[in-house]
Image: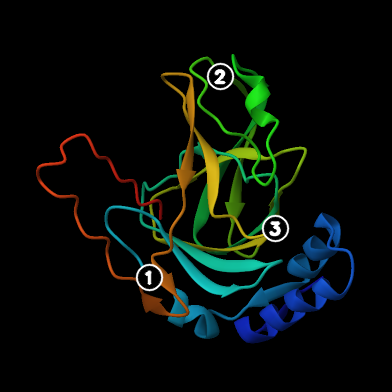
Amino acid sequence: MAKRLISIDDFIARIRSFEQGIITRDGVLDFCDSVQVSDSSLEPYVFFDQKFYTRNMIYRDDLFEVMTICWQPGQKTAVHTHNGQLCWMIPQRGNLGVVDYKWLGCDHPENQNVVGIDCLAGSDHTKLEVVREIEACAGGTVLTADKLQTIHRLYNFDEPAVSIHIYSRPIDSCVAFDMEKQHCYRRQLAYFSKLGIVEPKPEPAPAHVSNLVTIAAR
């Protein structure tokens, strides 16, 4: 079945309508799979950066967050969780690689016993196993992360790419994994732009504070 072309404004209006009932992975997935957002309506929210992929907020309320992520060739995420929330990814332009992982255990599983986030993180002996690796193609299948499959890594190939991401609820931080060191840590997330306006870059740390490290996740 051909996908129906709609604007990003109409897309968000339909996403907001799910807030009137119970939000399920499959309900939102069926809608996202049935439509194609027009490139022209999405253009105000497309920003690239040579150093990092960019997270560009289009809409946010208490239940939903909608953004573009823009990828230069070779850019990739860390292996990460989704803070116990649901996520839908629409490949809009270009192709992306997706690697899903299964959590096998760590030396601090008790850190998952926390309210409001998925885990405190901080393990130095985290074990993950690759479940599958797939390619997400523009106009193709909408991909999801849910409460059963929440850990993955995204990466771009050899051309600029744009993807649309929907989260419920919004995510301000997640657990990220250093695969070489088997270490996990909580990572704060930030936007490159909000509502089509690029955010000011954070001020650099004072020179005398040599042990202060700031990570601006994009």
Picture coordinates of residue 50 (x, y %)?
A: 27, 57
- Amino acid type, label 2: Thr
In this view, the mark in front (1 or 2) = 2
Residue in the image at 35% along x and 65% along y: 48
Which quadrant of the view contains residue 163? Answer: bottom right
Residue in the image at 69% along x and 79% along y: 11
In this view, the mark in front (3 or 1) = 1
Q: Residues within 10 Å of mark 3 (few under 14, many from 20)?
A: many
Earlier sequence position, callout 3 versus callout 1: 1
In this view, the mark in front (2 or 3) = 2
Q: How far apart are marks 1 and 2 (CA)?
A: 34 Å
Task: Determine which residue is flagged by label 2.
Answer: 126
Picture coordinates of residue 165 (x, y %)?
A: 60, 62
Disc 3 is placed on an element classified as loop
Earlier sequence position, callout 2 versus callout 3: 2
Q: In this view, does 110 lie above or below 176?
A: above
Task: Determine which residue is flagged by label 3.
Answer: 142
Quadrant where the image shows the C terminus? bottom left
Q: Is residue 179 above or below residue 190?
A: above
Task: Determine which residue is flagged by label 1.
Answer: 47
Q: In this view, does 197 lie above or below 84?
A: below
Quadrant where the image shows the N terminus? bottom right
- Amino acid type, label 1: Phe
Q: How crowded is mark 2: few (under 14 residues within 10 Å), some or many (20 or more)?
A: many
**Is residue 14 in sight in this rendering?**
yes
Earlier sequence position, callout 1 versus callout 2: 1
